[in-house]
Image (cartoon, helix red, strand yellow):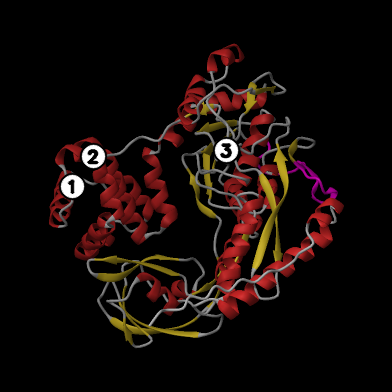
């Protein structure tokens, strides 16, 4: 029997050219709405498969927003909740993260002020069951779905405690807790204060004020502000942090927009605690948006030194619009410029610089070589002069006054970290040595000053790693000091937390080392 083939053709007549000619945007928008509705109706009726209308529209809206510019985005309901948590600095849950270590699902971080901290959970505790369900064969996403939930709902977890192996079921009430924007802060020595920010959330002002008060009581005389890896957040919070270091009437940044409501000039005010301290700001290729606003305002006003790597080059402002179904979208409404008028936002089409023509401007050759390696060509570069005669230029992103490149490490160090072997070994070491360890190191300061990863411990770590089939003696010799430092840092992380861990890991940080070596220059720039 001959098979019949059907071709269904539907014509829709749309008066389109006349609308374009009239340039009537409202009618054009209404037309596109009708077209979308018609497409969905036809697909729902005639497509061979059932249509997921919500998913189809989510995908369409994402592509629509991205067609305007890379930073205009649509957020489905599931993603929007995470965006709100990040920007507001508030998270809902119990405050744990976990990893698969030694074939066990092990808690590897506990958030401050979270239900997990209140219940005295520890790093190293093993999760056995969630709501009576054995989870050892579940994937990470499946476990997260069991842990996550709405505010004030109850979660029961069976846990094997790390220090004494007691098995106990904990009943948690999921709640909102603050998710901190400050990674770590401490005095590097008697004079130099160090603070690292991971984002500019709505709660950062309150956090930073407390840190500023602590540093003031510690009689800090110099400060390092670490913005490496900080991709931004609320512009207003970034401006507030910049204001801690700048005096009136210095400009922090200006926003340019076709709409008057989004045009703003942000200037410093007087009376902030760090206005008279020599300052160094650390940046890298993942410092973006608000981080770049701060770095540029410090650099343009000759307030301090910028040390590190060229920044990301994202300097546009977005406004978020929420919709009735808990989805949202953001639109780029403005662009920041620096106090000298430099554009931070990077044109992705930019190509290589011929830096010979810029040598007369005394621009750092290492910075220019980085540009040459990354791009290609010979574009025009705008040159700017600071009030104290320093030469800056505008090429997308902020280029440091002193260029630092991250030290390369061998694959051994990378694999040890990714496989969690540092943490596994440290947990094993502490479990076996806990009585003698805590008898000897009753405080972090004692540990910091006197604990040493000696050859015996290194050999023990080598044997442990070999059992995991991860080791290379040649690579170990190259990274030996880094591995020793990381082992000491991880032990501190388990016992005392991330802030104390950072105090150790920072000892071999080339960026911080460079900063400490250049404070005389930062002070001279500030005072002259």
- Judged left or right of residue 522, residue 118 is left
In percent of width and height, residue 280 lies at 56, 34
Closest to the observer: 336 or 69? 69
Q: What element carries label 1?
A: helix
Q: Does the magenta stretch include residue 256?
A: yes
Q: What stretch is highlighted in magenta?
A: 255-276
The residue indicated by pointer 3 is 348
Q: What residue do we see at 59% from left, 34% from top? A: 398
| 245 falls in the magenta region | no
Residues marked 3 and 2 touching at CB (< 8 Å): no
Q: Is mark 2 on a helix, strand or loop?
A: helix
Q: Which of 330 and 351 is in front in this view?
A: 351
Sequence-wise, the earlier of marks 3 and 2 is 3
**Camera-nearest residue between 374 and 244:** 374
The residue nearer to you, when weighing 83 against 200, is 83
Q: Is residue 408 above or below residue 131?
A: above
Marks 3 and 2, how far apart at CA:
39 Å
- Residue 269 placement, left or right of 309: right
State the residue position of label 1: 458
């Amino acid at each position: 029997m001959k098979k019949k083939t059907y071709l269904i053709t539907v014509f829709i007549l749309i008066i389109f050219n006349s609308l374009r000619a009239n340039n009537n945007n409202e009618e054009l928008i209404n037309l596109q709405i009708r077209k979308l509705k018609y497409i969905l109706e036809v697909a729902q009726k005639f497509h061979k498969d059932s249509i997921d209308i919500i998913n189809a529209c989510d995908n369409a809206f994402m592509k629509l927003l991205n067609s305007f510019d890379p930073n205009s985005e649509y957020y489905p309901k599931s993603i929007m909740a995470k965006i709100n948590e990040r920007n507001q600095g508030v998270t809902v849950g119990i405050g744990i993260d976990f990893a698969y270590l030694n074939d066990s699902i092990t808690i590897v971080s506990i958030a401050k002020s979270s239900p997990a901290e209140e219940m005295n959970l520890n790093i190293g505790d093993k999760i056995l069951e969630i709501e009576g369900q054995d989870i050892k064969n579940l994937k990470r996403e499946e476990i997260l779905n069991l842990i996550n939930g709405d505010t004030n709902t109850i979660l029961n977890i069976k846990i094997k405690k790390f220090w004494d192996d007691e098995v106990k079921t904990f009943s948690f009430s999921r709640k909102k807790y603050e998710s901190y924007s400050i990674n770590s802060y401490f005095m590097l020595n008697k004079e130099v204060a160090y603070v690292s920010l991971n984002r500019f959330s709505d709660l950062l002002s309150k956090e930073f004020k407390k840190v500023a008060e602590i540093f003031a009581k510690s009689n800090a005389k110099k400060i390092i502000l670490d913005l490496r890896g900080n991709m931004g957040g609320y512009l207003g919070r970034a401006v507030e942090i910049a204001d801690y270091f700048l005096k009136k009437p210095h400009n922090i940044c200006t926003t340019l927009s076709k709409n008057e409501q989004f045009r703003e000039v942000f200037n410093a005010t007087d009376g902030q605690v760090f206005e008279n301290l020599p300052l160094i700001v650390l940046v890298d290729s993942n410092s973006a948006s608000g981080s770049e606003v701060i770095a540029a305002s410090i650099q343009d006003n000759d307030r301090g030194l910028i040390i590190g790597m060229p920044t990301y080059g994202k300097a546009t402002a977005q406004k978020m619009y929420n919709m009735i179904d808990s989805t949202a979208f953001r639109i780029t409404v403005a662009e920041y410029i620096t106090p000298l008028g430099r554009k931070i936002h990077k044109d992705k089409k930019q190509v290589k610089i011929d830096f010979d023509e810029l040598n007369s401007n005394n621009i750092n050759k290492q910075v220019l070589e980085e540009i040459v390696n990354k791009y290609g060509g010979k574009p025009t570069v705008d040159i700017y002069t600071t009030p104290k005669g320093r030469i800056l230029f505008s090429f997308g992103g902020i280029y440091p006054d002193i260029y630092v490149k991250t030290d390369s490490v061998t694959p051994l160090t990378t694999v040890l970290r990714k496989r969690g072997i540092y943490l596994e070994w440290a947990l094993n070491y502490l479990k076996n040595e806990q009585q003698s360890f805590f008898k000897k190191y009753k405080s972090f300061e004692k540990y910091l000053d006197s604990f040493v990863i000696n050859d015996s411990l290194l050999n023990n770590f080598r044997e442990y790693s070999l059992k995991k089939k991860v080791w290379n003696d040649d690579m170990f010799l190259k990274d030996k000091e880094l591995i020793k430092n990381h082992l000491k840092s991880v032990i501190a992380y388990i016992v005392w937390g991330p802030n104390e861990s950072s105090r150790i890991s920072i000892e071999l940080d080339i960026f911080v080392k460079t900063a400490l070596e250049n404070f005389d220059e930062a002070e001279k720039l500030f005072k002259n």
